[in-house]
Amino acid sequence: MLAAALKNIFNTREVLEIIEHSKDVAFCCAELSEYVDGVSRDEAYLIGLFHNGGALLLATKEPETYPKFFSLTNSSPISGVHKEIEKYGTSHMDIGILLGQRWKLPVEMLNVIMHHHTERNDMGQEKIRGMMAMVKISNMIVNEISLGSYITEEAKSYLKNAQQELLLDPETINQIRRILISSL
């Protein structure tokens, strides 16, 4: 229902693609929630849905240019954000924090929104680290399957670090991929 409401608010092709991406990430996060202590399926779905809220606003303001940067932050999750900051003077995470505060999201979710493009997962509480890893893994699965994004070495390292945080074997990641594919 929340995803449908977002579609009504942000109703351009570029923005709808980001919403679809976020819905798929939310789906994967919900599937991964059983591997993260203290994170409910609903909470996991919400962070997956809201983690790119700032990207929605940037795509609304810059529909001609921002989708290229969104794609870049998906294929190159760390260096892509640096290029996003060079172009816009801010990142979708910074804008996402402002939105999240306005939406009164819990502090744990705000931390995940702020740091979901950091390379390492060695910060904060165990729950926050787990949620960040969940979003990172979900992003990589969705980028690979839904968007057909080329998986760069940077993205592989990003996925590997998140996978290690949750102590997930490759078969578990493949299982989430298969579940997403079967839901499309």
Image (tube, grey):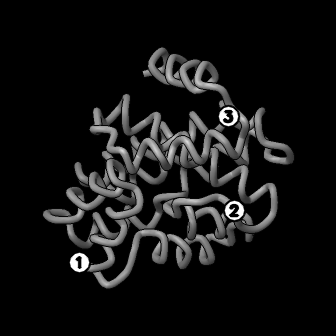
Relative to 17, residue 88 above or below: below
Which of the marked residues, 2 or 3, is nearer the chain's N terminus? 3
The residue labelled by disc 2 is 122
Q: Nearer the viewer, residue 34 or 8?
A: 34
Q: Which tag is nearer the camera, tag 1 or tag 2?
A: 2
Which amino acid type is marked by label 2?
Asp
What secondary structure is found at the residue carrying circle 1? Answer: helix
Which amino acid type is marked by label 3?
Leu
Q: Residue at x 46, y 76 (%)?
A: 95
Which mark is on residue 140? Answer: none
What secondary structure is found at the residue carrying circle 2? Answer: loop
Which mark is on residue 32? Answer: 3
Judge from the rendering whether residue 14 lies leftward or rightward of residue 154; answer left or right. Answer: left
Residue 106, by quadrant, is: bottom right
The residue labelled by disc 1 is 87
Question: Residue 108: percent from the left, percent from the top?
Answer: 73, 65
Q: Residue at x 51, y 17 (%)?
A: 178
